[in-house]
Amino acid sequence: MRCHSRDERVVDLSEDSGVHLEVASGRLRCLALTSAAHFVNDGTVFFVPLIAAVLAKRPGVSPLDLTAMFVAFYSTSAVLSIYVGSRADRTGRPGTLIGTGLALLSLGLLGFYIAATYSEGPILVVGIIGSAVLTGFGSAFYHPLGAAIIEASFGEKAQGRALGVNGAVGSLGRALYPSFFFVVALFITQSESFGFFALVGLMASAILWMGFRPAAMAKAPERTPGGDHQMAQAATKGIAVLTLVAFIRSVASQGIVAWIPIFISTQKGVGVTGSLGLSLTLMYGAAIVGQPIFGLLADRFNKRLILGVGTVGIAASIFGYVSTTGIAEQTFLILFGFFTFSGFPLLMSLVSDYVPRGSFSSGNALVWGLGVTGGAILGPLIVGAILLPDYSNMGFVFGLMAAGALVAAVGTVFLAKTQTKGKMPLFG
């Protein structure tokens, strides 16, 4: 999809400055809308571990219940992302689908608010699992579709810069939302804060949906032959290996990410306070710096090597975090965020090297949905299963996850060789 109805292949922009300005304006509008969506999407998605930390303090909510919540959230996102990517390639309207996804994500967050505020016991557990399913469905939309929109709209020469701006805004959303949450919670309860941010998300989804509706924004210059055909094109050998590497990497990293708010609040003795929000902000915010650095390195060196080094960094930083205190532990937590949340540009760049141009959404959905999100199903489940019946051995479990990250790093050796310089997004 392009964010302007004109097809660059039949328009000589060098001979008509008016057309050039019109197309440039459409691209900037596309970038603004997708970046705003990235900010709200990632901020809302990364509320889920924070929700778990809040619910862990509620009577009758066990580690098993929270494990079920994580599994429901990540499995729904993984399974439905394949459908979302296929539908986007088939209809040529990923922009309006992003608005729809953000609305579903916000409705899921509203469900958490209702369940936490008005229910107790078994009804509370059913409510949070149902909300996790709806939130997971909403989270399946943005990453494969947002990347595909920018890749198709800006082309090879400019997509890196565009993805850089887009990714920086998304990382900013992840970094700021935890702190925003505790600021809002100064005036209302923590449960009510989830309802507040759900309303923010619904308003953002309406703006995005209307912004992508005009023909110049929503109509693709060409239609794909069909979702099944595009998915078949995307399922190359390179994509299969990359999906497996992404899966193992995600099992390790997301198993930690899902439970780390509880680890900080219980094992580090912070509690559910503003200090927890600050720690999460520092962890998520590290990717604002990490993504451009990894992008620049990947432009100069082998992408597979950079992905492997970054995955080793996940393991080393979490080993350091669980075994230190004070300034050292905060430093390792920041490094964990630096390496963990900088994988998106590397993975999406490799996807664009392994699939035909017309299958970006489907290829992104396979790697991000089955790989990253699929691994995020198993990771929290493994951690939750070993934690039963309490949280006392969480540091040991995090060590096991770090060892899994080392396995993923070794797996990058089996990825097919790609060009050293090319279509590398600097952010993600």
Image (cartoon, rainbow, N blue to C red):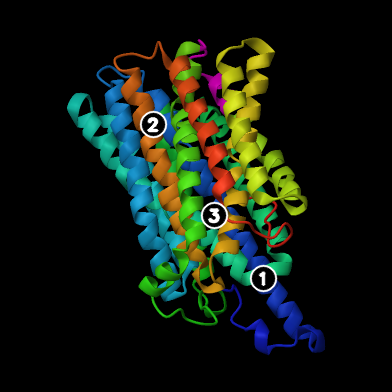
Task: Name the residue beneath numbered marker 2.
Answer: 380
- SS at badge 1: helix
- SS at badge 2: helix
Residue 379 percent location from the top left of the image: 40, 33
Task: Name the residue beneath numbered marker 3.
Answer: 37
The amino acid pointed to by label 1 is Gly
Task: Name the residue beneath numbered marker 1.
Answer: 155
Q: Residue at x 64, y 62 (%)?
A: 31
User: Is residue 385 one of those drawn in magenta?
Assistant: no
The reply to whether the C-beta atoms of the residues labelled 1 and 3 are less than 8 Å apart is no
Q: Quadrant of the N terminus?
A: bottom right
Up-down: is 428 above or below 208? above
The disc, 2 or 1, on the residue closer to the chain's N-terminal end is: 1
Judge from the rendering whether residue 223 lies leftward or rightward of residue 217; answer left or right.
left
User: Is residue 278 one of those drawn in magenta?
Assistant: yes
| Span of residues in magenta | 268-280
Up-down: is 188 above or below 296? above
Closer to the camera in the image, 33 or 251: 251
Marks 1 and 3, how far apart at CA? 21 Å
The amino acid pointed to by label 3 is Ala
Image quadrant in which you'd find residue 83: bottom left
The disc, 1 or 3, on the residue closer to the chain's N-terminal end is: 3
* Tag in front: 1 or 3: 1
Residue 81 percent location from the top left of the image: 39, 56
Name the mark on residue 146. none
Q: Residue at x 40, y 69 (%)?
A: 232
Disc 1 residue crowd, few under 14, some 14–19, many 20+, Cα 10 Å: some
